[in-house]
Image (cartoon, helix red, strand yellow):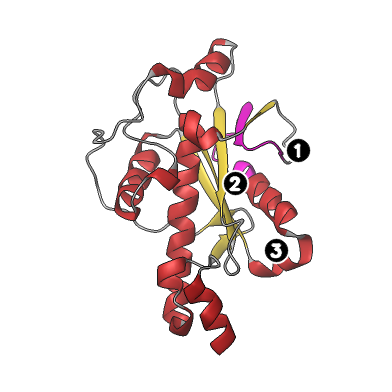
Amino acid sequence: MVQDRCRAKIFPCRPTDPQSRDDFSGSWVLAYENKFWQDGFQRIAGVDEAGRGPLAGPVVAAAVVFPPGMSETFGIRDSKQLSPSRRAELSCVIQQKALAFNISATEHFDIDALNILQATFKAMRCAVEGLSMAPDFILIDGNRSPHFGIPTQMIVKGDAISLSIAAASILAKVTRDGIMMQWHKIFPQYGFDHHKGYPTAEHLDAIQKY
């Protein structure tokens, strides 16, 4: 399910109207980007992940670089605040509007070998390394970060207050959900189409049964 070391499969998206229906509005959502654009950084990558909590499946990370000075938000917001259909729509918008984006998946065997934190860091590094342009600054969700070798700003709950990180959270979530839907076709008894590998009662019951 991974195309190469630092590039996950990107699932097809349909053309969509980028006009926002639920705008993540206000200049504050670009406050971090605007600050560092004004400081002279031109290729700011927002980085986030999906899949640290599940019992099954990969951890997926994404990196997104928007054009310097961008002011439109297109309804992009934290992936957890969006329906699956809206996430899918916005995934297409992000791919259309970003200067560069990349998605990386670290598989279950790496999670078992490395631990979930280090596997997440591996996916994040790969997401950044696989970008078509080298970023000069990183905005990353959370209070811990892998070493990227360039200036990095960690932001707790960054997916709720930074457009670039929110965009990365959407790409990571849509990609991971797509991977789990593929796994559901192979192992339908586990119900991955419902819980995507998270430890729900349904999933725990299936583990006991199978």
* Precedes in sequence: disc 3 or disc 2: 3
Amino acid type shown at disc 2: Ala
Tell me which corner region of the image, top left, top right, bottom left or bottom right, holds residue 115.
bottom right
Picture residue at 47% right of the left edge, 68% below the top = 180
**Secondary structure beneath disc 3?**
helix
Tell me which corner region of the image, top left, top right, bottom left or bottom right, holds residue 10.
bottom left
Picture residue at 55% right of the left edge, 26% below the top = 43
**Residue 46 % position (x, y):** 55, 34
Picture residue at 44% right of the left edge, 40% below the top = 78
Q: Distance of mark 2 from mark 1, alpha carbons?
A: 13 Å
**Residue 2 % position (x, y):** 56, 63
Of 4 and 206, the residue lying toward us: 206
Which stretch appears magenta? 127-145
Dot label at residue 147: 1
**Secondary structure beneath disc 2?**
helix
Of 90 and 78, the residue lying toward us: 78
Q: Is residue 109 above or below residue 185?
A: above
Mark 3 vs mark 2: give the one in front: 3
Farthest front residue? Answer: 201
Of 18 and 77, the residue lying toward us: 77
Using the rendered image of the protein, determine whether residue 162 is visible from the camera's viewpoint. no
Residue identifier under label 2: 127
Residue identifier under label 3: 111
**Residue 14 % position (x, y):** 27, 52
**Residue 31 lies in magenta, yes or no?**
no
Quarter in which the C terminus is drawn: bottom right
For label 1, count other residues whose C-alpha is less than 10 Å away and answer few (under 14), some (14-19) or many (20+). Answer: few
Determine whether, in the image, residue 75 is placed left or right of residue 157.
Answer: left
* Precedes in sequence: disc 1 or disc 3: 3
